[in-house]
Image (cartoon, grey):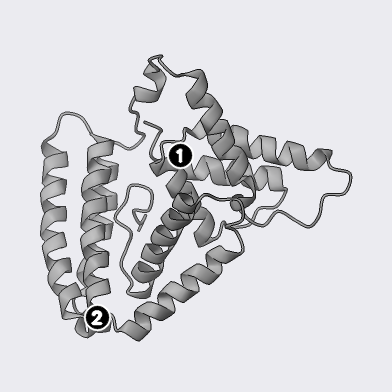
Amino acid sequence: MENYFNYFTEIEEHFQKRRGQVRPLSPLDWSLIESLRDAGVPLAVVLRGVDQAFDRRSKRRRPVGKVNSLAYCTQTILAEHERQKESRAGRNDPAAQAAEGDLDVPQLLKLLESARRRLESLLGGPKAAELPALRTVVEKVLGSLKGIMQEIEASQSLDYEGLELKLNTLEERIVAAILSGMTEESLLEAKQETQQEIQRHKRGLKAEHIAMLESKLMRKKLLQTFGVPRLSLFYLPLN
């Protein structure tokens, strides 16, 4: 398992370095990175793919335009991943099975407590009043978060992969509550905005990757609209 806490930041920094411009990645780029991680693409493979994409671009006589999105490197990254899988077929890869984390228990609990407080603040806000189902689910999620934090305090070692799965499940429950309470018009508008954002970057991507990006970007859009913090080790709020 890749290091949960540097997968995103290392890809972002490496891409910015190769692009020659320090500018925050777009929500679509973050969704793409998350999709690569979910697909099991190792960090080293992503970085090599980024390098190969930019190296090929630099060899062109007249590179057209600027690289504005990580999506520019997607095909190269996926091709590199396929080559790696083929070269490792039939072999064990201990490095790929090693789990590593860089947060200790107090730090992790602090991040979870910050997320819990932000969720709790939603209960008295207008968004929860608009969607009674959201309020009900958030109350249950707060109870689950408390239980997770108690498990972490009592554990001898941290299971980052298991923790991410639990947090992701809680986030999915919140997203489902939001979707169930939205009007058809609001839901259609959100879907159209998501598809428009992806339209510019989907050339050359497989249908399954496009669907994955749409799902993840839609989730982010809904959570941001309703002020819900991301329940993931990648996105835990720092304050």
Label 1's element?
Answer: loop
- Residue 23, located in which quarter of the rendered image? bottom right
191 is higher (above) or lower (below) than 141: below
Distance from Cα at disc 1 to Cα at disc 2: 33 Å
Amino acid type shown at disc 2: Gly
Question: In the rendering, at what x and y percent does residue 172 appear?
Answer: 25, 59
Q: Which residue is drawn at the image coordinates 51% and 59% (left, top)?
A: 28
- Quarter of the figure that contains the C terminus: bottom left
Quarter of image, res 176: bottom left
Residue extending furthest toward the top: 91
Task: Please provide percent x and percent y for residue 8.
Answer: 48, 45
Type of the residue with mark 1: Asn
Report whether 130 appears left or right of 71.
left
Name the residue at 33% across, 47% down: 233
In the image, is residue 34 above or below residue 138?
A: above
Extreme residue in the right direction: 61
Q: Residues within 10 Å of mark 2 (few under 14, many from 20)?
A: few
Disc 1: CA contacts within 10 A as few (<14), some (14-19) or many (>=20)? some
Chain-order first, disc 1 or disc 2: 1
> Where is residue 120, by image quadrant?
bottom left
Residue 60, position as x, y percentages in the image:
84, 42
Foreground pick, 133 / 209: 209
Q: Which residue lies at the image location 27% right of the left edge and 66% below the top edge?
A: 175
Q: Taking 187 as reference, is 57 above or below it?
A: above
Instruction: Please name the residue that numbered disc 1 is placed on.
Output: 6
Give the quadrant of the N terminus.
top left
Disc 1 + disc 2, Cβ < 8 Å = no
> What residue would you read off at disc 2?
125
* Residue visible at 40% across and 58% down in the picture: 216
**Viewer-side residue, 107 vs 177:** 177
Element assignment for label 2: loop
